[in-house]
Image: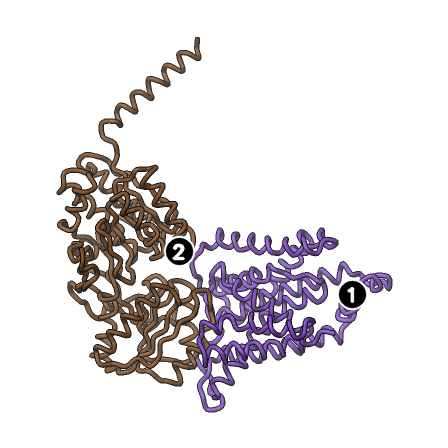
């Protein structure tokens, strides 16, 4: 029973970490970033580069986040900004961008599996069972991330500007808020979160050109169900991640793989605007 | 006028070269292989070993005095691509033989074309067994040969009574574990659980929790190569499961790259680079010389491919012709001593093989624990 509880909590934490970057971008920019999966992959390869050059595995996450931030700003400037007035085209462009990034990775590193060193391995004793130390660490990371993002949105000038842009962009601009600057910072932040998440999950996964792809669909579903709010995303991760673990454990792991998508569709039928949507 | 001279000169050269080649047209070997898709990681090593075999044969005077030409076609690692690849190789390039390492899906899709054209086909990939055609020969292992060393070692040497089986949800994964379960039960062991995940899934947590709660004496896995294998191994090590672990799908190279997570894994192969024989030493140094830094580590898929080309050479030489029917009759009769030892495809179109049970050491190398001489493939195709 303890193991089931820990499985649910850690799976939810991982989902939260992975989906956060996607939600930040959708919230402020009204843009579904389909390159999110590719950003996760870039994070994984950043981790690989760091440990391959012999640096400490603890540096993988900050380095990946930095790479993501720079990548995000470049992508916003070159791909997304020219398409602000054409939201559907912008979504298509991010989809294409994801394919381009994946192919560049294939050219640079090949299709094979790469390995990065993990910051920690083995198990920790908790509630009288030994449990994967890294998964437990990710729970802590998820909590800090949730608190940090909330603080950023509600306690800082950037957060105030971002919320103003979310509520009414024209009015915000009229009041002198540079909405272009808000957008570019947001996209950079979202990409940094995505790449950081990619580095955070590599100790559990293999690093290959498609590593981010399976996470894209689940993240997308979670963000829709969340109603694009941080507490909503936490609740959605717990509900859907929990459902996935329960179905995998008691029914079949194969069905567990589609639980999030099916459950999300049902939830959206009942609450079309998501759990925390107005 | 000058143009005319040039043109006639060109025509002359052309006539000269074509008449030279017409005397001995090359023997064409068709190699449909997964250059893209799931097999794209291993395919380059297979192409390299084929190229070495062809070069060696050509330098030594060819087959019956004729040069060998390789025609490589991408099968996309799947059924659709394989149909196109087999079709163009057989009917457009008109190859004399097909020799290839492929996925089971690609092989099954190509077989009808092989049967219709009655082309000899040597399949060089290990697979789940029981695929039969009068025109197909297999020189790699089947579950009967690969699984038994692992289970025997676990039961007899490590006193394992209870097992847990984990796999990827596809034909090879399920086929291997189905045989494993059967063999464990015949050996008096008990299977506590058998679970699968889709090939693109990466979170094994619920299955690993189940393994922990059932506490088996040993775990045996058969996933798709590459990513699923790595994610499962990493997560299993991270979750503190440290019972004997037999991995039916890991190869030497991947095990070496995986670092400390791979330490202690048991693997069972018909080829390991560490095999001590003259043939293997000569093969490895020739590969090294030909490809240098671009060399893909030779493995249990690329070495059978190399040997299969020599087996075809032996069959053509015995038959005295490349006539398809005569070659097919000769194929099970000839043998070739390659890096894996003496290879003869004489048991219902399959091959008795010497198998090696290895264990991954801390430095990523594989030490041979036990050698199983001439393991029989069993009843694969009783009607052939």
Q: Residue at x 23, y 30 (%)?
A: B24
Image-quadrant location for residue B144:
bottom left
Indicate the chain on which mark 1 is placed: A
Viewed as shown, does residue A164 lie left or right of B23? Answer: right
Residue A224's place in the image compared with B51, above or below, is below
Image-quadrant location for residue A17:
bottom right
Q: Chain A is drawn in which colour?
A: purple
Secondary structure beneath label 2: helix
Q: Share a chain, discs 2 and 1?
A: no
Image-quadrant location for residue B208:
bottom left
Q: Which residue lies furthest to the bottom in this view?
A: A128
Residue of label 2:
B41
Residue of label 1:
A165
Indicate the chain on which mark 2 is placed: B
Residue B301 is tagged as none
Q: Which chain is brown?
A: B
Secondary structure beneath label 1: helix
Q: Which residue is drawn at 17% across and 36% down?
A: B64
Residue A77 position within the rendered picture, expressed as x and y whole percent measured from the top left: 69, 54
Viewed as shown, does residue B128 lie left or right of A200? Answer: left
């Amino acid at each position: 029973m303890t193991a089931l509880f820990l499985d649910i909590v850690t799976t939810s934490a991982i989902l939260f970490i992975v989906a956060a970057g996607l939600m930040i971008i959708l919230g402020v920019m009204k843009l579904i970033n389909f390159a999110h999966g590719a950003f996760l992959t870039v994070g994984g390869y950043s981790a690989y580069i760091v440990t391959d050059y012999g640096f400490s595995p603890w540096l993988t996450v900050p380095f990946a986040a930095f790479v993501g931030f720079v990548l995000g700003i470049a992508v916003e400037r070159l791909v997304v900004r020219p398409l602000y007035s054409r939201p559907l085209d912008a979504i298509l462009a991010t989809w294409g961008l994801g394919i381009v990034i994946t192919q560049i990775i294939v050219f640079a590193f090949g299709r094979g599996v790469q390995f990065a060193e993990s910051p920690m391995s083995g198990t920790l004793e908790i509630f009288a069972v030994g449990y994967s130390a890294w998964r437990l660490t990710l729970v802590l990371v998820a909590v800090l991330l949730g608190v940090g993002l909330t603080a950023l949105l509600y306690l800082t000038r950037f957060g105030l500007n971002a919320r103003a842009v979310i509520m009414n962009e024209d009015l915000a601009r009229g009041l002198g808020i540079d909405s272009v600057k808000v957008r570019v910072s947001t996209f950079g932040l979202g990409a940094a979160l995505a790449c950081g998440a990619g580095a955070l999950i590599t100790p559990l996964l293999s690093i290959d050109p498609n590593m981010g792809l399976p996470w894209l669909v689940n993240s997308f579903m979670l963000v829709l169900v969340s109603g694009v709010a941080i507490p909503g995303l936490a609740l959605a991760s717990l509900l859907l991640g929990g459902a996935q673990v329960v179905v995998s454990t008691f029914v079949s792991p194969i069905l567990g793989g589609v639980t999030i998508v099916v459950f999300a569709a049902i939830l959206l039928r009942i609450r079309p605007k998501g759990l925390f949507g107005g | 006028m000058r143009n005319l001279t040039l043109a006639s000169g060109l025509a002359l050269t052309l006539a000269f070269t074509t008449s030279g080649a017409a005397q001995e047209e090359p023997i064409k070997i068709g190699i449909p292989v997964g250059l893209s898709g799931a097999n794209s990681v291993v395919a380059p090593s297979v192409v390299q070993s084929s190229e070495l075999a062809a070069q060696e044969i050509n330098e030594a005077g060819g087959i019956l005095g004729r040069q060998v030409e390789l025609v490589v076609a991408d099968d996309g690692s799947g059924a659709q691509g394989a149909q196109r690849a087999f079709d163009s190789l057989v009917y457009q390039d008109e190859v004399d033989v097909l020799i290839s390492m492929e996925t089971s899906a690609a092989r099954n899709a190509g077989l009808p074309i092989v049967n219709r054209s009655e082309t000899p086909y040597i399949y060089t990939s290990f697979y789940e067994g029981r695929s039969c055609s009068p025109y197909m020969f297999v020189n790699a292992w089947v579950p009967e040969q690969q699984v038994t060393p692992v289970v025997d070692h676990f039961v007899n040497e490590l006193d394992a009574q209870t097992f847990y089986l984990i796999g990827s949800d596809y034909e090879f994964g399920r086929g291997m574990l189905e045989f494993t379960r059967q063999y464990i039960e015949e050996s008096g062991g008990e299977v506590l659980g058998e679970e699968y995940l889709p090939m693109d899934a990466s979170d094994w947590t619920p299955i690993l929790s189940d393994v922990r709660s059932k506490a088996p004496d040993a775990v045996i896995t058969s996933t798709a190569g590459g990513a699923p294998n790595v994610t499962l191994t990493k997560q299993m090590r991270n979750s503190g499961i440290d019972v004997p672990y037999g991995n039916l799908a890991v190869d030497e190279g991947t095990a070496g790259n995986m670092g400390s997570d791979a330490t202690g894994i048991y693997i069972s192969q018909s080829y390991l680079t560490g095999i001590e024989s003259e043939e293997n030493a000569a093969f490895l140094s020739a590969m090294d010389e030909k490809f240098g830094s671009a060399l893909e580590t030779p493995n249990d898929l690329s070495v059978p491919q190399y040997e299969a080309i020599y087996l075809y050479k032996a069959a053509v030489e015995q038959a005295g012709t490349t006539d398809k029917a005569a070659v097919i009759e000769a194929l099970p009769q000839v043998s070739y001593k390659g890096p894996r030892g003496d290879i003869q495809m004489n048991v219902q179109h399959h091959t008795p093989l010497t198998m090696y049970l290895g264990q991954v050491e801390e430095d990523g190398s594989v030490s041979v624990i036990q050698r199983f001489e001439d393991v029989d493939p069993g009843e694969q195709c009783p009607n052939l």
